[in-house]
Image: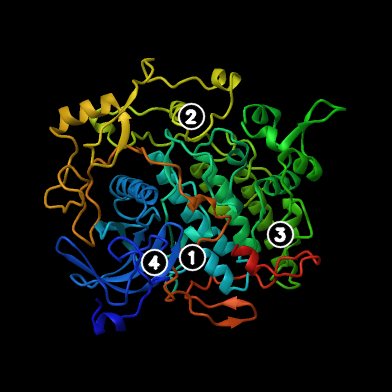
């Protein structure tokens, strides 16, 4: 029976009626948090001070560490196996990134400070950040940002993607909500967050990834995906930052594909030939024998689903026309207008490299970072070709011990055998994408389960287990003095508030059930907004946020909405 003090506590989680886990969890498997709750792990105590946000994965609380006074964002995962296991993958990836590829926190990747298991819920402590880029656009009334500010933000995201590519990590859910401002009162510095959907490039298991507005064309078509899907998402984000509205607000995957084809053209037949979803959206033209996108009626007949297209926010359909037609903010000054026109030409060319339909030709983060739009150099001639990219060689998670990791095709084959995802193509696809080999030509050894590696239920090659135990003298290395979550053999973390220790993280792929519905939300699962972010001072459509004056140049005009859309954009952006 609750005491009077307990009855007076303010419940922060809704619904607040406990139905499972000894009364600690509500009907949604969320831990019921109360204002002032203390979450203890080892010698550290966190006091809950508010809720920053919630989503399908669980909730994020603003907490204070009673031992250090540091404020953190505590991600409390739902008490369900699928979410629990996926969060452990997020921990493994972030520990790897923070300790091996962003040790000094210079690559704009969120810092994971600690993690713990509390009342059967996995909790992850992150540095406390501020508003996300969607909130920034919202506070600016969905007016576009200046190209100066777009450049500053995009260049930082590219820096993060370079680190991810070097580490062999694909984010898989890059969107404005997952890019947060560090301290908007001081600078326009941002960090990439939410690695709950991330994977390693040689373990691309899932076929349903990325939020729909930012979903790459290869993911829609079921073509083998790589790091390039994050670059597509960044192209969509960059366009949205300038226009204030999403470039491809598809109401369904078919609607998304229609918008992409209308704006950028149709993918090459070779790509369609090796995509497992081509038959869902394309048909053979009787007169030309060429593949073409199904009409709305053909799609409804083929799929037995009604098609309800989303709203069209722009009167133009071609990307070049949309960028050129966006209202200028420089008045009638011919010099300023000409300078802005040149910047837009560079920006359009930059977007073209990120939104390239062929993922093999799409620019890498390093190549994009060299573009005149980012460097500020003059864009001459209307064309720019990047230098070949030679990425830093990475050995994902434990190569120092001689680990050998399966390639993407083999991982997809394993996933298919386990019923996780269908293979991208049959027959010809297998011939074109053979199983990977190591440098001396051997096909990787079969995978097996090795639970001792941090008790993370990881899959890895036999060579990895043998080498780890031989070189390190145990099933998994641990850092001295670091507290353990799962007991002996667990992943070690640094004392709270410090950087994770540079230890070898567990192998990348997890064995767990069907991916949760977190990937099935169409668009908006807003990450925490602590309400401490941008100071709002509107003057002529501008936003005072403590940015340097050179960056505080928001476009005063709104993108031209289609007059047939009377319902506005806010509810559509928050679907």
Residue where numbered disc 4 is placed = 129
Q: Earlier in the sequence, mark 3 or mark 2?
A: 3
Where disc 2 sits, the SS reads helix
Give me the residue at 38% from left, 60% from top.
29
Labels 1 and 3 touching (C-beta < 8 A):
no
Q: Nearer the viewer, residue 18 or 565?
A: 18
* Res. 341 mark: 3
Tell me what residue is drawn at x 30 percent, y 84 percent: 8
Q: Which residue is mark 2?
A: 416
Residue 445, compared with residue 478, is above or below; it is above
Where does label 1 land, which residue? 132
Please identify, in this view, whether the residue under mark 4 or under mark 3 is nearer the observer: 4
Can you say whether 67 is above or below 283 in the image?
below
Q: Please, which residue is most extreme toward the right here?
A: 287
* Dot 3 crowding, Cα within 10 Å, few <14, some 14–19, many 20+: some
Label 1 neighbour load within 10 Å: few <14, some 14-19, many 20+: many
């Amino acid at each position: 029976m609750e005491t009077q003090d307990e009855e007076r506590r303010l419940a922060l989680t809704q619904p607040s009626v406990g139905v499972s886990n000894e009364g600690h969890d509500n009907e949604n498997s969320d831990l019921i948090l109360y204002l002032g709750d203390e979450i203890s792990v080892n010698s550290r105590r966190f006091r809950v001070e508010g809720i920053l946000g919630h989503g399908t994965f669980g909730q994020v609380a603003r907490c204070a560490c009673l031992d250090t006074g540091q404020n953190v964002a505590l991600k409390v995962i739902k008490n369900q196996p699928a979410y629990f296991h996926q969060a452990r993958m997020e921990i493994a990836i972030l520990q790897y990134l923070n300790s091996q590829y962003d040790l000094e926190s210079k690559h704009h990747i969120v810092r994971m400070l600690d993690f713990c298991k509390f009342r059967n819920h996995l909790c992850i402590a992150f540095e406390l950040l501020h508003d996300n880029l969607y909130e920034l656009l919202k506070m600016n009334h969905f007016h576009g940002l200046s190209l100066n500010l777009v450049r500053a933000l995009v260049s930082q995201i590219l820096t993060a993607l370079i680190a991810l590519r070097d580490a062999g990590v694909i984010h898989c859910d890059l969107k404005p909500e997952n890019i947060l401002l560090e301290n908007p009162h001081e600078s326009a510095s941002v960090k990439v967050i939410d690695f709950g959907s991330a994977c390693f490039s040689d373990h691309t298991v899932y076929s349903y990834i990325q939020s729909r507005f930012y979903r790459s064309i290869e993911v829609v078509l079921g073509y083998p995906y790589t790091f390039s899907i994050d670059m597509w998402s960044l192209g969509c984000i960059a366009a949205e930052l300038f226009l204030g509205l999403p470039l491809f607000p598809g109401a369904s995957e078919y609607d998304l594909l229609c918008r992409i084809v209308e704006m950028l053209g149709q993918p090459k037949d070779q790509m369609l030939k090796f995509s497992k979803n081509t038959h869902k959206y394309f048909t053979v033209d009787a007169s030309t024998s060429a593949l073409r996108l199904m009409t709305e009626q053909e799609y409804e007949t083929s799929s037995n689903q009604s098609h309800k297209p989303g709203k069209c926010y722009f009167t133009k359909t071609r990307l070049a026309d949309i960028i050129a037609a966006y209202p200028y903010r420089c008045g009638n000054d011919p010099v300023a207008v000409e300078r802005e026109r040149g910047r837009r030409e560079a920006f359009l060319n930059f977007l073209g490299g990120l939104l390239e339909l062929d993922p093999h030709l799409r620019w890498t983060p390093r190549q994009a970072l060299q573009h005149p739009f980012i460097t500020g150099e003059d864009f001459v001639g209307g064309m720019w070709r990047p230098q070949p990219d030679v990425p830093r060689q990475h050995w994902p998670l434990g190569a120092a011990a001689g680990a050998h990791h399966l390639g993407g095709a083999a991982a997809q084959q394993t996933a298919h055998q386990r019923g996780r995802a269908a293979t991208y193509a049959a027959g010809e696809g297998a011939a074109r994408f053979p199983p990977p080999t190591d440098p001396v030509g051997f096909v990787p050894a079969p995978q097996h389960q090795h639970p001792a590696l941090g008790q993370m239920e990881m899959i890895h090659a036999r060579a990895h287990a043998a080498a780890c135990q031989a070189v390190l003298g145990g099933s998994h290395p641990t850092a001295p003095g670091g507290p353990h979550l799962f007991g002996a053999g667990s992943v070690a973390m640094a004392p709270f508030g410090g950087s994770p220790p540079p230890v070898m993280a567990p192998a990348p792929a997890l064995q767990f059930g069907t991916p949760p519905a977190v990937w099935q939300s169409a668009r908006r699962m807003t990450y925490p907004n602590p309400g401490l972010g941008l100071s709002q001072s509107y003057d002529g459509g501008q936003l005072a946020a403590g940015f340097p004056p050179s960056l505080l140049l928001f476009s005063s005009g709104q993108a031209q909405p289609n007059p047939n859309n009377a319902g506005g954009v806010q509810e559509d952006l928050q679907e």
